[in-house]
């Protein structure tokens, strides 16, 4: 196996290595403060606003609760709310679960996202495990209480994140993955009404499922279950919706990296101690696996060179081509793509498909809060082996906003310095005038 450096469309480089132009979080104070007391006032104000937002989750009016959840999400994206979470963990979790159970589709989506942010902020441990245990039933029930695509997608993201952070045992991860899979492959029964999932839901299911797949031990895979999954993912490569094809391609990346097809082939070849009929079955199984691999290889090759169609998004087409070219090189030559992106002057690098899938999923989930979390969230730093660059003034770490307080001619500090110099100049001039006046008075008296 080898590695190949590539400029991936989905691992966009940040603009500059310069510390002054590196991404600064929206959590930094709206105005520069000179004093520690001023900073403390701003932080206290933020805490009071968060407390008020949590209190508003008890309101009867749905629109009020939605607005409160949106405020909480903004706060969690812009800053890691560790102290707030320590105080309000249980309250926030259970109010969000109540919104998932009883709220509108929009409220459910917002509450789901909030729970995911809560888990990422807390990091692995007893509280993250509690989030998973408390949320799994309400989330799975919410899957059945309506088929609005954006709501289902948010619930899937939430389930993926809380399992990623709070799931300790493999069985917990597999349970979440099965819940996801049932949305596109429901277990049929006399009381089950099947609804054809939309492209948005299929994409969300496959993306969340493959995100959790990156955490699974390859040797725990059930051959029958995974062969069914690979067959289904292969069928998705022929769908008209490009987002579905891309999600399926990313899932197959992880499966091939784990060597799952090779595992099936080995098990089929090793099943030669049974009866003749069992031996024939193993040969048929091996031939099926080899045929499936050849089919997927042809599909990947076609998608890597797909021609553009009038009206199709060029950006998505280019990403699809890039993605499947990388998959093709991996299948044919064993090359892993290496990617790199800049965060605050330091490079966050990936060298496996699993890392890249995790990175892309978390970037989509965190959105504008991704950079802030990578700079300050120790859990995510450990996941990717990333150590952010620290900006130092003297011996203390300061934010980009604080550096502007020292460097900008329009900053509070520089304005204060200018005022101080002007005042000193006026005092100096007054002193000179005073001395001159005194001198003249003495001369007159003599």
Image: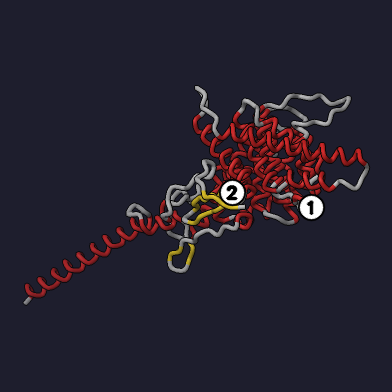
Rendering coords of residue 398 (x, y %): 47, 60
At which x and y percent is residue 165?
Answer: 70, 51
Front residue of 305 and 90:
305
Q: Which residue is mark 1?
A: 169
Residue 64 in sight from this viewpoint: no
Which numbered disc, 1 or 2, marks the residue that appears first in the sequence?
A: 1
Q: Residue at x 64, y 48 (%)?
A: 354
Tag of residue 335: 2
Q: Quadrant of the C terminus?
A: bottom left
Q: How many marks?
A: 2
Q: Residue lying farthest top?
A: 310
Crowding at mark 2 (Cα within 10 Å: few <14, some 14-19, many 20+):
some
Q: Is residue 365 left or right of residue 38?
A: right
The quadrant in which residue 283 appears is top right
Colour option used: secondary structure
- Which residue is most to the right? 275
User: Toward the viewer: 207 or 277?
Assistant: 277
Q: Residue at x 72, y 42 (%)?
A: 159
Horizontal side of 306 relative to 86 (left or right) equals left
Q: Quadrant of residue 206?
A: top right
Q: Nearer the viewer, residue 157 or 360?
A: 360
């Amino acid at each position: 196996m080898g590695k190949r450096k590539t400029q991936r469309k989905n691992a966009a480089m940040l603009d500059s290595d310069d510390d002054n132009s590196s991404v600064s979080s929206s959590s930094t104070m709206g105005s520069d403060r000179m004093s520690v007391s001023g900073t403390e006032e701003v932080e206290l104000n933020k805490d009071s606003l968060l407390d008020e937002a949590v209190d508003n989750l008890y309101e009867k009016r749905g629109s009020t609760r939605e607005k409160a959840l949106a405020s909480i999400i903004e706060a969690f994206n812009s800053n890691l709310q560790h102290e707030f979470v320590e105080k309000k963990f249980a309250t926030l979790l259970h109010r969000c679960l109540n919104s998932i159970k009883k709220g509108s589709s929009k409220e459910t989506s917002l509450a789901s996202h909030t729970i995911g942010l809560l888990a990422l902020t807390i990091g692995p441990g007893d509280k993250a495990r509690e989030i998973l245990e408390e949320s799994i039933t309400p989330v799975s029930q919410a899957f059945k209480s309506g088929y609005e695509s954006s709501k289902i997608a948010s619930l899937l993201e939430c389930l993926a994140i809380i399992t990623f952070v709070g799931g300790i045992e493999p069985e917990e991860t597999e349970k979440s993955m099965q819940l996801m899979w049932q949305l596109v492959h429901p277990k049929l029964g006399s009381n089950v009404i099947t609804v054809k999932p939309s492209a948005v839901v299929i994409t969300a299911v496959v993306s969340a499922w493959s995100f959790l797949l990156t955490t699974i031990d390859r040797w725990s895979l059930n051959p029958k279950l995974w062969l069914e999954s690979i067959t289904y993912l292969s069928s998705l490569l022929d769908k008209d919706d490009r987002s579905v094809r891309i999600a399926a391609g990313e899932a197959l990346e992880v499966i091939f990296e784990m060597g799952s097809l090779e595992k099936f082939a080995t098990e089929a070849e090793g099943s030669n101690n049974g009866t003749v009929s069992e031996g024939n079955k193993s040969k048929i199984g091996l031939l099926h696996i080899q045929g499936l691999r050849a089919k997927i290889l042809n599909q990947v090759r076609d998608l890597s060179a797909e021609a553009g169609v009038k009206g199709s998004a060029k950006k998505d087409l280019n990403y699809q081509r890039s993605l499947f070219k990388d998959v093709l090189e991996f299948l044919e030559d064993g090359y892993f793509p290496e990617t790199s992106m800049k965060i605050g002057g330091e490079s966050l690098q990936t060298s496996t498909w699993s890392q890249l899938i995790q990175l892309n999923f978390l970037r989509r989930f965190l959105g504008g809060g991704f950079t802030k979390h990578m700079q300050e969230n120790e859990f995510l730093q450990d996941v990717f082996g990333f150590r952010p660059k620290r900006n130092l003034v003297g011996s203390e770490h300061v934010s980009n906003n604080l550096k502007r307080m020292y460097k900008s001619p329009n900053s509070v500090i520089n304005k204060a310095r200018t005022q101080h110099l002007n005042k000193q100049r006026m005092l100096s001039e007054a002193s000179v005038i005073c001395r001159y006046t005194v001198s003249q008075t003495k001369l007159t008296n003599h």
